[in-house]
Structures are given as structure tokens and as C-alpha cells.
Image (tube, grey):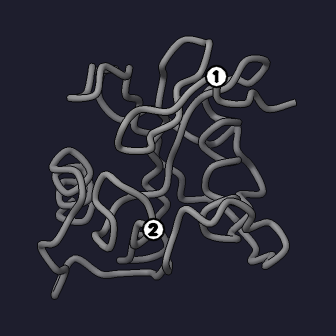
Amino acid sequence: MTDQPIAHTKDGRPLFDNTPTVVVMLVRDSACLLVIRRANEPGRGKLALPGGYHMRGEIWQQAGAREVAEETGYVLEKPYLIQQVGDTVTDEYGNNLIFGFYNGPYRFDPAAKQDGETMECSWMPWIGFPDDWAFPRHWLAAKTELEN
């Protein structure tokens, strides 16, 4: 069961009656990362990593896998392989922010994409990565991962 927003901010961000934790996913395939182009503010039209709110009843790895599927259509087949990258930090919006890393099997299921939060998704190598990112922390996490 997923929670529904209790309200929205003036810029349209949903507010939930739960711990404000956002899981952001670094999904890797060879030398590429799965990235999205955001359809919502903040950062409409800019690049970001897939991710979103951690809901009640989920472990954070399930939240990360769910958000990847909802935003991209890619289903992470072994979400228990997701590992936390770095420490949990508080972002500029007051959310707890967890970065997860996944390099396991996945499959594309167009029916899994549900939320309309993305304009597009793609697998991008670091070489030639555009610098039009919605969130500096996403850009830094992507850069750090792909330079390793």
C-alpha cells in the first residue's frame, strides 16, 4: 500500500504524513547510469537520478526499487542487492536523503512505469554527460560513481 499526499507545496511537491525520507538510486549497467529527465518541479526538464519518497511498510531498498520502476519502467529483480552509498543527509527541502546503488539484474516492463514524473529516461555514460541537472547532489553522486 502506498501513502497518498496530505497536501502539496506551492510549487506542487507532495507532502506526506510520514518520515520525509527520499531514496535516490544509482542504477548501473556497465559504464552507464540510468537517468531521468524530470517532468515536475523542481527541476522540470533537467536530469536527475530516479528516486522518491520512502513509504510506510517498505524498507528503503524496496522504496528505491519501486521508484525506479515507477519512473523508468525498469524493474530491479533483486532489490536486496541495493547498497547504501555514503551517509544519510538532509537535503535542501528538509528530506532525509539516502543514495542507493544497484548493479544487479533488471528487466524492462513498460507497464511498471506509472507516475508521469519523467519526460524520458536513458542510460548515460559519464563522458558527454550534460550539466543540466536538477539537483547538485544527484550530479555529484553520478559523477563519483562513474569515475570509479
Question: Does 125 sit above or below residue 58?
Answer: below
Q: Residue at x 53, y 52 (%)?
A: 102
Question: Viewed as shown, does residue 14 lie left or right of 76?
Answer: left
Depth check: give the residue in front, 60 or 120: 120
Q: Where residue 121 sits: x, y (%)?
A: 50, 78
Compare residues 111 and 147 and report the one nearer the observer: 111
129 sits to left or right of 124: left
Question: Could you classify mark 1 by the number of other residues whose Cα lies within 10 Å: few (under 14), some (14-19), or many (20 or more)?
Answer: few
Q: Is residue 11 left or right of residue 128?
A: right
Task: Determine the residue positioned at 44% across, 70% down.
Answer: 36
The quadrant the C terminus occupies is: bottom left
113 shown above or below 70: below
Q: CA distance from mark 1 to mark 2?
A: 21 Å
- Looking at this view, name the residue that lies furthest to the front: 10
Which sits earlier in the primary sequence, circle 1 or circle 2? Answer: 1
Disc 2 marks which residue? 39
Please name the residue shown 70% across and 47% down the image.
66
Callout 2 secondary element: loop
Give the residue at mark 1. Answer: 6
| Up/down of 48 relative to 129, above or below | above
Residue 76, position as x, y percentages in the image: 71, 58
Q: Which mark is residue 134?
A: none
> Which quadrant is the N terminus positioned in?
top right
